[in-house]
Image: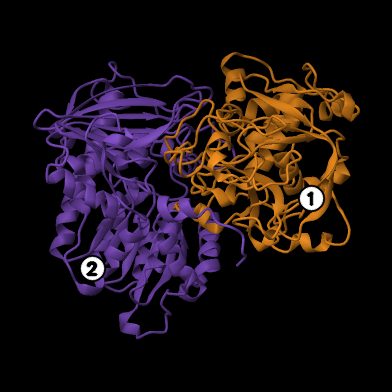
């Protein structure tokens, strides 16, 4: 390395990944030639940026041999770039020859067939495929890590609840990528709130107003890609694939707020609209404002906006009868949770702040999952992850239909965005066909009061 | 893949071949006091970004010689600051303030393109050239790059040096005037503004709070630019608030070669991604890193919380203390000089398909 000076305050006090990252640098990662029976094999289904990042976290778990043995995606280019990036950092833990790389819609089966019961499959495709892939993982007796959201609509949520129960019965360990739940700082805040440090919670607020995000705004489809693959490539833009900007972006802040309340909301009302549309063809609004109500009447207000040039805020807050708490300050990590005696978050009212540094929750969630597998401890986040997904969809549906939506109405709704995904092939038609102008059906609040499109 | 790509390309495709030269080299945008052929004609001016409200105030910095680096006795000194050596710098303009979100976001979030689109304004020849440096941007970030610390009037942060370089190329195309990051030598020369002390106001750390935002007075956040006292040449926030990108690779013994002969417009052209230099220290730093001669190197850890792999070439998700300011040399370099020196950076930064 160099002797270049470091901004030590920022990296020691403000952020927490130093420990995890330097563990890598220091070569703490185990070598794969340990006892074969002790090695956990991993398969990756969905080789995008987050899936690849999840593998990097998996291969960095410092408690025993673990290696990647199979990969599947519908884009050859994604799989290739994912493999190359991982191979650059984790060459000794990569055992993915050409015959264990699968590029097709049913490649998930082939990839999971490379594993033995007790191994881990990573499900990081757009969430539309989660139920399909999870079913097969259960059939094969595999432990699972799957990214959020788990579902985008009610029928797949009901399926996911059922699958979750099956996976618990089979003692499978299943982690869900709501990594904020694994954050040590937020965990301490939760304990403090539950012990009454801010009194009874009277209001929660959550914001993800960060300007243009991911593939939420999707331009017209070029000619050199099929409609199906274009929708999958730009999954944030299409409700069947991802649940759109609400499900994919707001779920973390909604989930951590509900966690602090230690409850799930029973209904939602919401506003939203599409202000700058241009030639975008996606189904998203560019602003959302959701009011959730818990059983005791307490509200959670959630604001999402992807319009550029506006005030930005990406944080969650709790207000109580004795003070207030910052649940997360700036994006997901470091959360820097704090408690104040008042509601202005002013320095003189500060009564507690997590001392830091905060371990990176993306790594901690993997350390927790693999530890549970190795120690055979009960570990299953499916029910909680499905509830978070369903509650998030409830807010989205309230905005998209313009109606008050209760939890039971949401849970029992019949609109399945993309049925029959098990029959999908690379040559198939897209689940969402475009209209004459190349644009897709959008939510029409008040007009389409019963379904989102 | 960009929603605004198609209309722009169509318009460009319609241009007559005879206009190609003019299309590639449009006249600069006319603004007051921006023109100068020699140093004596240089004046402060306000650069304008068309189709936005943003402006960037520029101050003339005279040509001169100075002693770069710090003496052995300086408190908090690092070995990479020596030996002190004579350095010659030609005249240039430098931004009075760190680049704010007001200007940076016009590029980063395509605000000028959005305005043209919603107002049915046709792009002019400069717009067309400049748009290329926006439309090549990848997917949008996943996070709030202000990290809740404020937007209007606050310094832009968390960009890679690559992002800052492309911003300059965009601004150059947009205005018709050549802008770039300062070299490390230009930055230190302008910061010192003729002083030889640890800071441009002297050596007394107790005075620092009057000139800079740093760990002890920043309350865990950056601040609006220009709220503290400027340096002798009128530049604000050279110490603190956000550390500022310069063009150079961080080469710890780079100054050694100049111990016998003066350095003339030195620049350590980057050949690898890390470490590259930021100068002046930021809101999360302690006083020694804010000194005029202090050099900080970038690090892979600056992308630590980016959970994607490959990590973005555009964002340092963890460099909340890093921003930049721009310069414009009095003598515009030739395309050849730009290619081999001023705009050169290796390895090439490319998004994966």
Is B234 positioned to the left or the right of B217 in the image? right
The image quadrant of residue A104 is: bottom left
Q: How is the image coloured?
A: by chain
The chain letter under disc 1 is B
Tell me how far mark 1 sits from mark 2, CA to CA. 60 Å
Q: Which chain is orange?
A: B
In what element is the residue under mark 1?
Answer: strand
The chain letter under disc 2 is A
Instruction: Name the residue at 60% across, 39% down.
Output: B137
Q: Name the one closer to the observer, B229 or B93.
A: B229
Q: Name the one closer to the observer, B158 or A442.
A: B158
Instruction: Name the residue at 38% across, 47% down.
Output: A126
User: Which one is closest to the eye, mark 1 or mark 2?
Assistant: 1
The x and y percentages for residue A200 are: 12, 35
The hue in which chain A appears in the rendered picture of the protein: purple
The residue pinned by badge 2 equals: A372
Q: Residue furthest bottom?
A: A35
Q: Above or below — where is B210 with respect to A118?
A: above
């Amino acid at each position: 390395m160099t002797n270049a000076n470091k901004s030590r305050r920022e990296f020691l006090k403000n952020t927490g990944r130093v420990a995890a990252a330097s563990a890598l640098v220091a070569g703490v990662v185990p070598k794969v030639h340990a006892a074969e029976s002790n090695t956990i094999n991993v398969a990756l289904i969905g080789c995008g940026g987050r899936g690849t990042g999840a593998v990097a976290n998996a291969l960095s778990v410092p408690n025993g041999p673990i290696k990647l043995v199979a990969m599947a995606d519908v884009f050859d280019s994604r799989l290739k770039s994912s493999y190359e990036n991982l191979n650059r950092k984790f060459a000794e833990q990569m055992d993915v020859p050409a015959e264990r790389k699968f590029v097709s819609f049913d490649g998930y089966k082939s990839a999971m067939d490379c594993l033995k019961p007790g191994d881990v499959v990573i499900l990081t495709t757009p969430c539309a495929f989660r139920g399909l892939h999870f079913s097969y993982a259960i059939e094969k007796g595999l432990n699972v890590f799957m990214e959020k959201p788990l579902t985008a609509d009610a029928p797949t949520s009901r399926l996911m609840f059922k699958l979750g129960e099956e996976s618990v019965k089979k003692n499978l360990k299943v982690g869900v990528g709501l990594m904020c739940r694994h954050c040590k700082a937020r965990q301490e805040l939760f304990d403090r709130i539950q012990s009454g440090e801010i009194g009874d919670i009277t209001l929660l607020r959550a914001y993800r107003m960060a300007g243009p995000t991911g593939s939420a705004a999707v331009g017209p489809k070029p000619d050199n890609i099929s409609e199906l693959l274009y929708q999958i490539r730009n999954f944030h833009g299409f409700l069947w694939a991802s649940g759109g900007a609400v499900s994919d972006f707001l779920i973390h802040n909604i989930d951590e707020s509900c966690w602090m309340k230690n409850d799930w909301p029973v209904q939602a009302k919401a506003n939203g609209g599409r202000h700058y549309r241009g030639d975008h063809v996606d189904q998203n609004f560019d602003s959302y404002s959701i009011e959730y109500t818990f059983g005791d009447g307490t509200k959670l207000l959630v604001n999402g906006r992807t319009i550029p040039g506006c005030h930005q805020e990406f944080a969650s807050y709790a207000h109580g009868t004795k003070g207030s708490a910052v649940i997360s300050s700036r994006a997901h990590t470091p959360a820097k949770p704090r408690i104040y005696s008042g509601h202005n978050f002013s320095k003189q009212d500060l009564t507690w702040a997590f001392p830091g540094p905060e371990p990176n929750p993306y790594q901690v969630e993997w350390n927790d999952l693999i530890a549970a597998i190795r120690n055979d401890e009960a570990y299953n986040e499916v029910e909680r992850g499905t509830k978070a997904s369903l509650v998030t969809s409830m807010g989205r549906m309230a905005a998209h239909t313009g109606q008050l939506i209760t939890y039971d109405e949401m849970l029992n709704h019949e609109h399945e965005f993309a049925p029959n995904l098990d029959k999908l092939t690379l040559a198939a038609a897209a689940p969402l066909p475009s209209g004459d102008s190349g644009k897709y059906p959008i939510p029409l609040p008040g007009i389409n009061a019963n379904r989102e499109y | 893949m960009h929603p605004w790509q198609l209309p722009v390309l169509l318009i460009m495709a319609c241009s007559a071949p005879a206009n190609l030269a003019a299309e590639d080299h449009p006249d600069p945008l006319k603004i007051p006091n921006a023109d100068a052929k020699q140093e004596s004609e240089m004046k402060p001016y306000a650069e304008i970004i068309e189709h936005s409200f943003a402006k960037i105030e520029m101050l003339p910095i005279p040509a001169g010689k100075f002693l770069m680096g710090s003496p052995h006795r300086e408190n908090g000194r690092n070995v990479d600051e020596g030996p002190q050596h004579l350095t010659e710098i030609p005249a240039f303009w430098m931004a009075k303030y760190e680049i704010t979100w007001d200007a940076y976001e016009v590029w980063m979030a395509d605000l000028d393109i959005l305005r043209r689109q919603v107002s049915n304004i046709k792009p002019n020849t400069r717009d067309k050239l400049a748009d290329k440096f926006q439309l090549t941007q990848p997917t949008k970030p996943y996070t709030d790059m202000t990290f809740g610390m404020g937007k209007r009037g606050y310094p832009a942060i968390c960009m890679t040096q690559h992002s800052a370089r492309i911003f300059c190329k965009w601004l150059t195309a947009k205005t018709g005037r050549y802008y770039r990051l300062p070299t490390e030598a230009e930055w230190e020369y302008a910061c010192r503004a003729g002083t030889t002390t640890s800071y441009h106001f002297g050596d007394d750390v107790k005075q620092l709070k009057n000139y800079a935002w740093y760990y002890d007075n920043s309350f865990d956040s950056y601040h609006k630019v220009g709220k503290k006292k400027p340096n002798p040449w009128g530049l604000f926030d050279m110490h603190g608030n956000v550390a500022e990108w310069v063009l150079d690779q961080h080469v710890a013994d780079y100054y050694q070669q100049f111990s016998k002969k003066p350095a003339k417009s030195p620049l350590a052209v980057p050949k690898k991604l890390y470490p590259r230099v930021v100068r002046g220290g930021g809101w999360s730093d302690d006083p020694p890193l804010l000194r005029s001669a202090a050099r900080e190197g970038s690090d892979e850890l600056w992308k630590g919380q980016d959970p994607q792999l490959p990590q973005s070439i555009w964002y340092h998700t963890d460099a909340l203390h890093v921003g930049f300011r721009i310069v414009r040399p009095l003598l515009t370099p030739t395309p050849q000089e730009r290619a081999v020196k001023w705009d050169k950076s290796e390895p090439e930064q490319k998004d994966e398909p």
